[in-house]
Amino acid sequence: MTPEQNAATANYVFDPEQVRSFLDADLFGAPLSATLAGSPGAAVAVVSIALMLIAAVATHLTARIAVARQDSDTPQARVMNSMTLWVFPAGVLVGGALLPVVILLYWVTNNAWTVAQQFLIYRKVDAEFATAPPPVVRTATAPKPGVKPRRARRRR
């Protein structure tokens, strides 16, 4: 379908006027539907690279906050933690060149929201744990495994 035909065609719930509005929309001069790989203009390059860098940093910060709260130190956890800290943000940088500006904008807003949400929620949870009373330690009333239970004798 040519760009002209696409702009004149309704798309699911959007009428042709709304489709045209999206196709004509831009962010700092870069069309929202443009990709860095497909539209090597200066505005597209600047906006795409900036959004890719911000999304990668936000992805890394989200992973750093999550990893800092983990207790597990198994080999599998270390591999997954390094992947979430470094491989996933690198994937954002590499994959971002193939995605439209509007998807990069979504990644930035979603990742920035997630970083802020994790920071605020974990700060609140940590404050609640700091003011919580210590847990009640109960003594075991059951016998240890393999030990015959002692029962109180009945008086007659």
Image (cartoon, grey):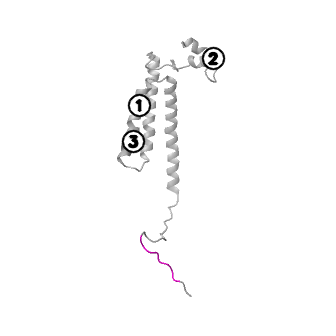
Q: Earlier in the sequence, mark 1 or mark 2?
A: 2
Quarter of the rendering occupied by the C terminus? bottom right
Q: CA distance from mark 1 to mark 2?
A: 34 Å
How crowded pointer 1 is (Cα within 10 Å; few <14, some 14-19, many 20+) is rated as: few
How crowded pointer 2 is (Cα within 10 Å; few <14, some 14-19, many 20+) is rated as: some
Q: Is residue 40 above or below residue 120?
A: above
Q: Earlier in the sequence, mark 3 or mark 1?
A: 3
Q: Is residue 148 magenta?
A: yes
Residue that lies at the very extreme toward the bottom in this rendered image: 156
- Which residues, given as a range, are shown in magenta? 146-153
Instruction: Name the residue type under label 1.
Output: Gly
Magenta-drawn stretch, dominant element (helix, strand or loop): loop
Name the residue carrying label 3.
Answer: 80
Q: Position of residue 41 (x, y in %)?
A: 45, 15
Q: Earlier in the sequence, mark 2 or mark 3?
A: 2
Name the residue carrying label 2.
Answer: 16
Q: Position of residue 8 (x, y in %)?
A: 61, 14
